[in-house]
Amino acid sequence: MGKKMYYSEFEDFSFDPNNVLGVVRTVKEAQSLPAGTVVGDTEGGHSISDQVAKALRERSHRGWQAITWNGESWNYIRLDW
């Protein structure tokens, strides 16, 4: 079994919409994403099912966050493990 990569909740993070994964279709896919992945959308999280959103939330210290970037409202989550 490989070593899990872990991102500290105190690590510097700068939001970049060019690096946001906008589509995660299944819980299995959500569980297989590497630590450090940022998932989000400008649809208020409506493009991600409740089950997938929960699986992502279970991998994040901060949970879902909201940010305005160049006038667009984003909801995103960064996976810590």
Image: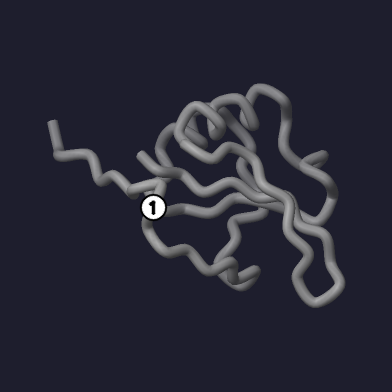
Instruction: Give 14 or 2, whichever is nearer the viewer.
Output: 14
Q: What residue do we see at 56% from left, 31% from top?
A: 57
Q: Is residue 51 above or below residue 9?
A: above
Horizontal arrangement in the rendering, residue 55 relative to residue 46 (left or right): left
Q: In this view, does 64 lie above or below 71?
A: above
Q: Is residue 42 above or below residue 29?
A: below
Horizontal arrangement in the rendering, residue 65 relative to residue 78 (left or right): right
Picture quarter containing residue 22? bottom right
Instruction: Give 60 or 37, whichever is nearer the viewer.
Output: 60
- The chosen color scheme is one colour
Q: Mark 1: which amino acid?
A: Phe
Residue 50's spot in the image, x, y percent? 72, 25
Q: In which quarter of the image is the N terminus?
A: top left
Residue 4's spot in the image, x, y percent? 22, 39
Residue lying at the far bottom of the rendered structure: 70
Q: In this view, does 36 lie above or below 1?
A: below
Could you say whether the residue bearing mark 1 is in a helix, strand or loop?
A: loop
Q: Quadrant of the C terminus?
A: top left
Horizontal arrangement in the rendering, residue 53 relative to residue 55 (left or right): right
Q: What residue do we see at 61% from left, 42% from top?
A: 24
- Residue on which the image places disc 1: 10
**Counting other residues with Cα less than 10 Å from the Cα at mark 1, is it few (<14), some (14-19), or many (20 or more)?**
few
Residue 56's spot in the image, x, y percent? 54, 34
Q: What residue do we see at 41% from left, 53% from top?
A: 36
Picture quarter containing residue 15? bottom right
Residue 76's spot in the image, x, y percent? 65, 50
Horizontal arrangement in the rendering, residue 19 relative to residue 69 (left or right): left
Picture quarter containing residue 47? top right
